[in-house]
Amino acid sequence: MGLALPDTNLRSSLGISDDYISIKNIQLQYDTSQDTGPIKSNLAVVSPEHNSIQFLGNMWRAWELTTPLSPSSLGDFIVSFDFEVAEKGEIHGKSSFSDPPGYDRPHLLLRPVQPFVSRKIVNTEMQMTRK
Amino acid sequence: MTGLDPRRCIAVGLFQDLGNVPDVFVAPYLTPVGGSHHYVFNLSKMFERLYNDLNYLAFVSDNDVGDKSGGNVTFSNIMIHTQVSSCLKDIDFDFNLDDCSVDNFLAAIGNKMTDIGCVNADPFMEMFAFWDATSDTEVTNNIETICANAYQEDAVDFSEAVSLEGQLVGEFIDGGSAYNYGSNQAKDASRIKYFDDKFASSRVLTYPDHHALDRCDIGAAMCCFVTSTGASAESPAPSNANAEACYTDIKASRYSAHVRNGYSIYPSDGVDDIYCEGFAWGTDKGSVDAGLKGNELFKVGFMNNFYTNGLVEQVPAAPMCGCIDRMPVVTESKCMEATAASSSVTVTYDSTLEDLGARVTLGAITYSECSEGNLLEHYKALAAEGKAGAEDVTYMESRIVGGGNCPAATGTFLATLGLTFA
């Protein structure tokens, strides 16, 4: 991930300024029981515009931020996103966390799972906007 | 870590009973199938354990049913906002709206922000900061409350005014009372005509606080009558019958039925034998359409169909008037619309008092049959204007199913109970 602006700009007292955070689309898998096959054949789909992620079927995915974000020093830490349900699963949610996936599972997982396995899959970039 | 709230995951789409699961925040608004929603969460206020660096962004789409292939959801336009502060908080301002909907309100806020030269250009985030909100629903709820209060400020409560017996209107809505079964309805209901003449065209009428009418999230209601005061025992149907009842899910109307659960199924013979008429305002609780829903209920349920046309009695186990989800599934429903074309709403903010409020200047209220011809088409028109979602239209289509479609609708309902409609 690369920050388009220095971190100090994000803390500007001017209030809100736009920039982008690009995250390498390296999808981390929580545990093998959440997938019915190899993760590389069952990736969450990043749109060509790099601004959306589509989840088809049972998927638990994390993306690592190359540069960690520090909510305590950034002041407010507010996330916004659009969410669309074309077909329901059971539970759909969003999380941000500090520990490696699987390290602190009760905070993200809802039932007992096998140990975490992560794999690097592709290198397409996904973009978030930071305001 | 002990003692801190461990939750760091927010469920925004939930189609499974979690029971008492302590490790997930459930969003105040859950997106339904076919729907979409713009979420904003202040994680600083939600996650007690948000003090370490964040190293990961994670999304969960959980579906363990069958081959796990079910589920198709999309997260997009993901943004992180830091150092959010309100631009308008310390400035007095005001603006006028024809309709105090959330969209119109935010558009006017956006114009104010442009006039003042705010750095932030997003009116939703401006109001999020203005109210120091935790989630997006606080912003929309606050706007809707400000607008709805404006319409209700000078409203007249017809449920208290049409009778000295305070429970009469509520009982009538459930299909009972002297209105339905009295021997002298002209006398019993005389105050309805008086109230109509005096207030219906000039005042907002309060939407009754009633179990059949509350939590009307889809923003549509309907009255169905099964007979008329002049009908014979041999031919009880209203002369202007326009619908067939398909089935009633008594669980949904249990407070009207006084029966906890069950269902009624009606054979479909293609003959209309009840009369249904409804009204709709959509999902914005602060819009003028929502503000006038009490007027529409009064006209549809009381003045026009009961007092003028003599229609009475409810479909068994359902209320006579209620939100669409508590009414029987029917083939058709006529539609009534109230409008107050020359009305306006003035929104004013006093920065010294930090008081943001609104007042309505109400024009003449007029009533007409919906131009779309029936309730379902009217609701679709509201959705086309952004006043309801596609998923809401789908739901309405499952409740007002069209002529000849009762067997399919009933079969679908019975399938949810594990039964087959033969």
Image (cartoon, rainbow, N blue to C red):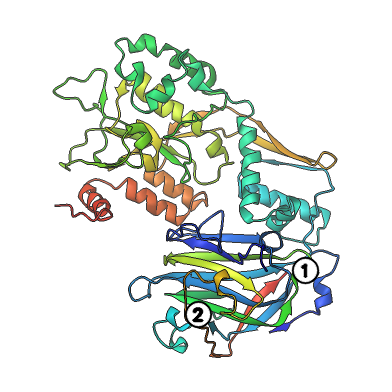
Q: How far apart are labels 2 and 1 at the CA level?
A: 32 Å
Crowding at mark 1 (Cα within 10 Å: few <14, some 14-19, many 20+): few
Left or right: residue B97 compared with residue B341 = right
| Image mark 2: chain | A
Residue shown at 49% from the left, 57% from the top: B20
Question: Which amino acid type is marked by label 2?
Answer: Val
In the rendered image, the vertical position of residue B48 relative to residue B335, given as above or below: below
Q: Position of residue B268 (x, y in %)?
A: 17, 43
Q: Residues within 10 Å of mark 2 (few under 14, many from 20)?
A: some
Q: Residue A72's spot in the image, x, y percent?
A: 77, 68
Determine the secondary structure under disc 1. Answer: helix
Instruction: State whether residue B373 appears in this view.
Output: no
State which quarter of the image contains the C terminus of chain A.
bottom right
The residue identified by callout 1 is A72
Please give the count of numbered marks on the rendered protein: 2
| Figure check: A85 above or below A66 | above
A78 sits left or right of B351 in the view: left
Q: Chain of mark 1?
A: A
Picture layout, residue B72 above or below residue B363: below
Q: What percent of the width, then of the height, locates residue B349? A: 78, 41
Residue B206 in view, yes or no: yes
Q: Residue at x 50, y 21 (%)?
A: B158
Helix or strand or loop: what does disc 2 sit on?
strand
Task: State the residue in front, B342 or B144.
Answer: B144
Q: Quadrant of residue B390?
A: bottom left
Foreground tag (2 vs 1): 1
Locate residue B115 relative to residue B177 in the image: left or right: right
Q: Amino acid at mark 1?
A: Ser
* Residue beneath the point at 42% across and 44% down: B378
Q: Quadrant of the N terminus of chain A?
A: bottom right
Where is mark 2, residue-wise? A45
Placement of B227 over or under A101, stated as above or below = above
